[in-house]
Image (cartoon, helix red, strand yellow):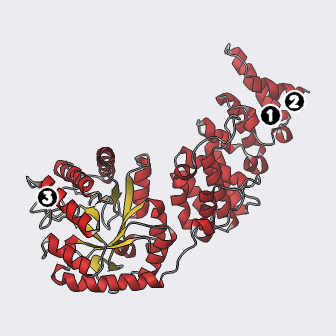
Amino acid sequence: MNWTWGYGTNGFTDHPLPSALDVLQHHGYGAVALTLGHPHLDPFASDWREQSEALAADLRRRGLRVVVETGARYLLDPLRKHRPTLVDRDAASRMAFLRRAVEIAAILDAECVSLWSGVVPDDVSTDQARVLLEERLVELAAFAADAGVTLALEPEPGMLVETVADALALRARLGHPANLGLTVDLGHCVVVEPDGVVGALRAAGPLLRNVQADDMLPTAHEHLPLGEGELDLDAALSTLREIDYRGVIAVELPRHAHAAPELAASSIAALIAAGERSVIAPTRSAVETPSSGDGRPLHPWTALAVKQVRADAARSARLFAAAGREVGRDPLSAAPFAPTADDVARAALIAALADSGADPAVAVALYRRGDDAERRGVLRGLDAITAPTAAWCEAGLELVADALRANDTRLVAAALGRFAADHLDDHAWRHGVLKCVFLGIPLSVVVALDARADDELAAMAERFAAERRAAGRSVPDDLSFLRARERA
């Protein structure tokens, strides 16, 4: 197995930390998820640095990997569990705690610092909470980056960031910080993830930095020993193999310290048995590489991503967001508004969705929720569909119309590709061509211009030219070209 089994110290609160580590090693664990705070390592103790350095030496001696967890219940406020959080109006003590967690993680050479958003308090609106969270995470991510530490945001039932989709959307709004990944609690997936544990892990994909293992029932956010809830552990581990997860999988049973040694033994037995039953997914090297529409082989990452979305359309959101990072964003030629490498990757994903019979609403959602590059990728993808169905045509026309209302030149250029040439009505197509002229986009980007240009387009170009002359403005060369072409 590529990952390492671990256990959370919040399930060993009746043991001193060295004793807890002794028990875990006795049962075969290779990692520990260290929750800072009582009783194991007080992050605000006067000798916190010395304690951290001694622990780092002990972990190295034992050969244990470590993840830093920040879920101590009453560390910051003895009266209010987990408060303040990152979505409280006053979060100074939470920010100080998380900065200290980063400093400790750097000393321990930890895999990551796991953290969560918090429950929106009564005196803060959801919109206000989002602003507070984003501002604070930007600050924390920068602080952690300077320390060489990775953060892993954990979706929690009932919190502002409740699902993997919430976490991915937040990360996108922050500009995809390289050192901000995800923690996924397998039990949480039973309670809140619409696509279950498999969908959540696939969505997290290469951003997954930390996994917590416990069971749950769909009706309650209550951590249960493995086998006592409805978690499909075999499917979860199979999916972790599929996405090539190589981090820590730590048992998370914070209310079971009274039986910690027994549960440590039974938990690792359950994990190992499920791991042996799980099916190994093909590695990247075992996947053949399909070609793009122009005959060039696809980037290996794109080839694998195409296969994944053909098998499960729900993976497309994560893959779409990851394309630029995985394949690059460079233009593929020197031509104006040439497709970029990530355009081609995303276009292949859209074509795969259409060809595999996926609902076009998936593509619409990718466009509506995406940034400008992702929207452009959807439009390029419409061009790559070989024979769009009526439903895909309808959805595609809706998206092309939206793009042509924009003033983003790259979006408008992408909208006037093969799909628009084949399916856009004459009126909308003509206005799209003139919008190119208005925005200074060369008409070389318009597919099938020679075939579709007509007298009405020439007349529209003539009226546009007259308006510019009347205003004392120059007439663009492309506008003159349209008029001259039709006169000829």
Q: Secondary structure at mark 1?
A: helix
Q: Residue at x 22, y 60 (%)?
A: 56
Q: Residue at x 17, y 79 (%)?
A: 257
The kind of residue tagged 1 is: Leu
Residue 390 appears in the figure: yes
Where 40 falls versus 320 (above or below)? Answer: below
Residue 87 appears in the figure: no
Q: Residue 268: x percent and y percent?
A: 32, 82
Disc 2 vs disc 1: Cβ atoms closer than 8 Å?
Answer: yes
- Residue holding disc 3: 51
Q: Secondary structure at mark 2?
A: helix
Q: Residue at x 67, y 28 (%)?
A: 440
Cα distance between the residues tagged 2 and 3: 82 Å
Q: Residue 145: x percent and y percent?
A: 33, 46
First reached walking from the N terminus: tag 2 or tag 1: 1
Rate crowding at label 3 as few (under 14), some (14 to 19) or many (20 or more) other CA atoms within 10 Å.
Answer: some
Disc 2 vs disc 3: Cβ atoms closer than 8 Å?
Answer: no
The kind of residue tagged 2 is: Glu
Q: Secondary structure at mark 3?
A: helix
Q: Quadrant of residue 260?
A: bottom left
Dot label at residue 457? 1
Q: Residue 449: x percent and y percent?
A: 81, 38
- Residue holding disc 2: 486
Rate crowding at label 2 as few (under 14), some (14 to 19) or many (20 or more) other CA atoms within 10 Å.
Answer: some
First reached walking from the N terminus: tag 2 or tag 3: 3
The kind of residue tagged 3 is: Gln
Q: Quadrant of the N terminus?
A: bottom left
Rate crowding at label 1 as few (under 14), some (14 to 19) or many (20 or more) other CA atoms within 10 Å.
Answer: many
